[in-house]
Image: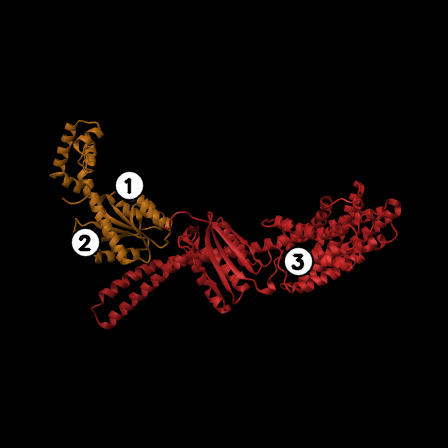
C-alpha cells in the first residue's frame, strides 16, 4: 500500500473481500502495477470513509457476510455515482454476470482464481471511466438547470434555432445561456465543449 | 401383417394341429345355434396373438382355415362355402383387432388399468365380445340365403353361446400358455415364488365353502346360482392375484364342465355356462387388478428409490461445489503471490528462480483445474441455456466412447445441422442422451448405432436407432418391457424439458425418438 500523502491527487482503488489475505494480495498486485489500492474486509467500513475519500474504482467480492456485493454496489452508487466497479466471485453464474454488468454497471465480472491481466485491464478501464465522469460532473456542477439543457442539446449538434424551438425559449436566450456555458467552462468553441461532454481534458 | 419368418412355420403348423384337436374336444358342449359353450381353441388363439402381436392375426387365420379344411369342419363341396370361410376367418381377425385397440388405448397412459396385467384382463374380455358383436354385421354383408335366416331370440342365444364359449376357453387356456411361453422363450424371468401355505389354505377354504353353498342352493331347488362362485372368485383374485385366480377358475370349471357336457337341454346348459362365464370373468379381472396394483406399487417403490438416489447426488454436488469454492479463495491469493514471486526472483540465483517459477506454474494449473471443475459441477447447473444439438450429441458420444470400444461397436452420427438448438440444462440432457446410447450399446453389442437429429415442424427430433439382435426381436413385448432405470431417468429429464421420449421400433430396429421444442432464431 502506498502512502496517500505521497500522491494526493492519484485516484485510489478499493479492494473489498471478506478474505483479508486475498484482499491484501490483490491490493499489492495493483500497487505493483502503479495503482494505489487499499484493502477492506467490511463493506460498511468502506462506505463509512467515502465522504473523505473518493475512489476511482472499487473491486468487490459478491458473496460476503451480511451485505452482498450487489447491495454494496447500490449503496456505493447512491453515495458516489462516478465510482467504477469490478466484481469478482468464487460462485460464478450467468445470471450474476449479467446483473453485474447490466444492472450494476460493473466494468467486468471476474471468476476466482483471478486472471491477473484481465483484472489490471478492468481496473485501468474503470479508473479512466471514473476520471471522465468526475470531469463531466465537475464541469456541469456550475451550470443552472437551463444551462444544462442547452449544453446537452448543443453537444449533440443542434443549432441555436433548433434548441430554442425544442426548449420553447427565444434564440436570444439560447445565445445568453451559451455565452454563460463558455465562460463557466473556459472553453473556446463547440469542438471543445463536445470534448468536455465526453469527459476529455481540454 | 408382418413378414413371416422361417422360424414361424413350425409354430403355425403346431397351431393348426392344436387348433383342430381343441376344436374337436369342444363338441360335447354344443347346442342349437352355437358350436360350443366351452371353446378352448379361443384360448390358444388369444395366447398366440398376445405373445406375437396383433399383426400376426392374418397368419393365424390362414392356419385356422387350413385346419378347418383338413379336419373336414368346412366342406369344400358344400353349399354356403363363402359363408363358412368368412365365418372361420372372423374370430382371428376380430381378436387381432380387439388386442390392437386395447394396446392402443393403454399406450401412453399411466394408471393401473394400462399396466400389462390389467390390459391382458381387459383384452381377454374385449376379444370374444367384439367377435360376437361383429357376427351380425358381417352376416348382413353376405348374400342372404334361406338357411342362415334367424329370428331375434335365436341370434341372441347364438351370440351369447359364442361369447361364453370363447371367454371360458380364453380364461382357462390362455394364461398357462402365456406363462409357459414366458418361461421358455424371451428374456429370462424369475419363477414365481411358491405361494404361502396360509394363502393356499385360505383360498381352498373359501372356494370349497362357496362350492358347497352352490350345491346347497341347487339341492334346495334354486338352480345353479353363480353368486357364491362370484364371491369366491373376487375374494381369491383380489387377495392373491392372477395365478390364484386362474387356479380357482380351473377348479370351478372342472367342477361344472363334466356335468354340463351330460344330458342337459340347450337352455339349461346355456344358463349354466352364462353363470360360469360370469364367475370366471370376475375372478380373472379381480386377479388382474390385484396384479396390476402390485406392479404399480413396485414401480412406485422404484421411483422412490430413484428420487432418493437423486437427492443424494444433489447433496454430493452441493458438497463438491462448496469444496471448490473453499479452495478457490486461498488459491486466488496463492496464485497472485506465486506470480509475484516468480517475477521478483527472475534475476536471482537460478535455483531460487526455478523454484518460484515452478510454484507459479503449479498455482496456475490448479487455478485452471478449479475453474474447469466448477464449470462441470456448479456453474449454471440450474439454469437452462441455449445449446447447439450437435454439441450435445458430440459430448454424449464422447462419454460412451469407452463402452463402445469395449463392445466393438460404433456410433454413426453425421449431418447434424449446426444451427439446430434447444433450450436445456446441458448436463441433464447430456445424461439423457448418454443413457439412451448406453441402452443401445447394451442391446446391440458390436453393431452400428445410428444417431440422427433434425427439425420437424417446431420440434427437434433426436433418434437413437440400433439393430435388433434376432433373439430379442419381438414386436409384442408388453408395454414397459426392458425399461431400465436409465430409460426412466432419460424420460423424466426429457419430459422436464417439455419434450417427449417414445419408442418407435421397426421390424429389425429399435428406435427411441427424443423430441424437444425447437428454439427459433440464431445462436448467440
Residue B10 in the image, given as x and y percentages of width and height: 69, 64
Q: Position of residue B466 (x, y in %)?
A: 53, 61
Percent x, y of residue A160: 16, 32
Chain containing the residue with disc 3 = B
Seen from the viewer's position, the closer of residues B454 and B480 is B454
Circle 1 packing at 10 Å, graded few (<14), some (14-19), many (20+), is: few
Badge 2 marks a residue whose secondary structure is: loop
**Same chain for the residues at labels 2 and 1, yes or no?**
yes
- The chain under label 1 reads A
2 or 1: tag closer to the N-terminus? 2
- The answer to whether B102 appears left or right of B321 in the picture is right
Label 1 near label 2: C-beta < 8 Å? no
Query: In front of the other: label 2 or label 1?
Result: 1
Q: Which residue is mark 2?
A: A3
Chain with red colouring? B
Q: Is residue A163 above or below residue B308?
A: above
- Viewer-closest of B199 and B415: B415
What is the tally of numbered marks visible in this picture?
3
- Numbered label attached to residue A78: 1
Marking on residue B51: 3
* Secondary structure beneath label 1: helix
Rendered shade, chain A? orange
Q: Which of pointers 3 and 1 indicates the residue nearer the eye?
A: 3
x%, y% of residue B305?
56, 56
Amino acid at each position: 500500500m502506498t502512502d496517500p500523502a505521497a500522491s494526493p491527487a492519484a485516484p485510489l482503488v478499493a479492494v473489498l473481500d471478506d478474505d483479508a489475505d486475498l484482499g491484501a494480495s490483490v491490493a499489492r498486485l495493483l500497487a505493483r502495477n502503479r495503482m494505489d489500492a487499499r484493502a477492506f474486509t467490511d463493506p460498511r467500513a468502506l462506505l463509512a470513509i467515502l465522504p473523505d475519500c473518493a475512489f476511482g474504482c472499487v473491486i468487490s467480492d459478491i458473496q460476503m457476510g451480511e451485505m452482498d456485493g450487489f447491495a454494496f454496489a447500490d449503496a456505493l452508487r447512491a453515495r458516489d455515482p462516478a465510482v467504477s466497479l469490478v466484481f469478482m466471485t468464487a460462485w460464478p453464474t450467468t445470471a450474476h454476470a449479467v446483473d453485474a454488468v447490466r444492472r450494476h454497471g460493473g466494468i467486468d465480472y471476474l471468476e476466482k482464481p483471478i486472471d491477473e491481466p484481465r483484472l489490471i485491464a478492468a481496473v485501468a478501464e474503470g479508473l479512466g471511466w471514473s476520471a471522465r465522469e468526475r470531469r463531466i460532473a465537475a464541469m456541469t456542477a456550475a451550470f443552472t438547470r437551463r444551462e444544462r439543457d442547452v449544453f446537452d442539446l448543443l453537444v449533440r449538434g443542434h443549432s441555436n434555432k433548433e434548441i430554442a424551438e425544442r426548449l420553447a425559449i427565444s434564440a436570444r436566450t439560447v445565445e445568453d445561456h451559451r455565452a454563460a456555458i463558455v465562460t463557466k467552462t473556459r472553453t473556446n468553441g463547440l469542438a471543445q465543449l463536445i470534448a468536455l461532454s465526453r469527459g476529455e481534458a481540454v | 401383417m408382418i413378414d413371416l419368418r422361417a422360424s414361424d412355420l413350425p409354430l403355425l403348423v403346431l397351431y393348426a394341429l392344436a387348433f383342430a384337436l381343441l376344436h374337436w374336444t369342444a363338441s360335447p358342449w354344443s347346442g342349437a345355434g352355437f358350436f360350443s359353450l366351452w371353446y378352448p381353441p379361443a384360448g390358444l388363439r388369444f395366447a398366440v396373438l398376445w405373445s406375437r402381436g396383433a399383426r400376426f392375426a392374418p397368419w393365424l387365420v390362414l392356419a385356422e382355415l387350413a385346419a378347418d379344411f383338413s379336419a373336414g369342419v368346412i366342406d369344400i363341396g358344400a353349399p354356403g362355402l363363402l359363408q363358412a370361410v368368412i365365418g372361420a376367418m372372423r374370430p382371428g381377425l376380430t381378436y387381432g383387432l380387439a388386442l390392437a385397440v386395447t394396446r392402443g388405448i393403454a399406450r401412453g397412459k399411466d394408471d393401473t388399468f394400462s399396466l400389462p396385467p390389467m390390459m391382458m384382463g381387459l383384452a381377454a374380455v374385449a376379444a370374444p365380445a367384439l367377435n360376437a358383436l361383429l357376427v351380425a354385421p358381417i352376416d348382413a354383408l353376405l348374400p342372404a340365403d334361406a338357411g342362415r335366416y334367424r329370428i331375434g331370440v335365436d341370434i341372441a342365444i347364438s351370440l351369447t353361446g359364442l361369447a361364453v364359449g370363447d371367454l371360458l376357453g380364453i380364461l382357462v387356456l390362455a394364461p398357462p400358455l402365456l406363462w409357459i411361453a414366458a418361461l421358455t422363450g424371451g428374456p429370462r424371468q424369475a419363477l414365481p415364488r411358491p405361494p404361502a401355505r396360509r394363502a393356499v389354505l385360505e383360498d381352498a377354504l373359501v372356494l370349497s365353502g362357496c362350492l358347497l353353498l352352490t350345491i346347497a342352493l341347487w339341492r334346495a331347488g334354486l338352480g345353479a346360482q353363480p353368486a357364491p362362485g362370484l364371491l369366491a372368485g373376487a375374494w381369491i383374485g383380489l387377495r392373491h392375484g392372477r395365478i390364484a385366480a386362474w387356479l380357482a377358475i380351473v377348479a370351478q370349471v372342472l367342477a361344472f364342465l363334466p356335468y354340463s357336457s351330460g344330458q342337459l337341454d340347450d337352455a339349461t346348459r346355456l344358463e349354466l355356462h352364462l353363470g360360469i362365464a360370469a364367475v370366471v370373468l370376475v375372478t380373472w379381472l379381480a386377479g388382474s387388478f390385484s396384479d396390476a396394483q402390485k406392479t404399480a406399487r413396485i414401480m412406485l417403490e422404484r421411483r422412490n428409490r430413484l428420487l432418493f438416489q437423486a437427492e443424494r447426488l444433489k447433496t454430493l454436488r452441493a458438497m463438491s461445489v462448496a469444496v471448490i469454492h473453499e479452495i478457490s479463495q486461498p488459491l486466488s491469493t496463492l496464485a497472485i503471490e506465486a506470480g509475484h514471486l516468480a517475477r521478483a526472483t527472475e534475476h536471482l540465483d537460478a535455483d531460487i528462480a526455478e523454484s518460484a517459477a515452478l510454484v507459479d506454474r503449479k498455482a496456475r494449473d490448479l487455478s485452471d483445474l478449479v475453474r474447469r471443475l466448477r464449470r462441470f459441477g456448479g456453474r449454471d447447473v440450474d439454469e437452462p441455456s441455449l445449446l447447439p444439438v450437435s454439441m450435445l450429441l458430440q459430448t454424449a458420444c464422447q462419454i460412451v466412447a469407452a463402452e463402445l470400444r469395449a463392445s466393438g461397436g460404433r456410433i454413426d452420427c453425421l449431418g447434424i445441422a449446426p444451427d439446430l438448438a434447444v433450450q436445456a440444462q446441458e448436463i441433464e440432457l447430456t445424461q439423457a442422451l448418454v443413457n439412451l446410447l448406453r441402452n443401445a450399446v447394451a442391446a446391440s453389442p458390436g453393431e452400428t448405432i445410428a444417431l440422427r437429429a433434425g427439425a420437424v415442424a417446431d420440434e427437434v427430433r433426436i433418434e437413437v436407432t440400433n439393430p435388433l439382435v434376432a433373439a430379442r426381436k419381438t414386436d409384442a413385448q408388453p408395454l414397459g418391457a426392458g425399461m431400465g432405470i436409465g430409460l426412466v431417468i432419460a424420460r423424466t429429464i426429457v419430459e422436464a424439458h417439455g419434450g417427449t421420449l417414445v419408442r418407435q421400433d421397426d421390424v429389425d430396429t429399435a428406435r427411441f425418438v427424443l423430441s424437444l421444442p425447437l428454439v427459433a432464431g440464431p445462436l448467440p
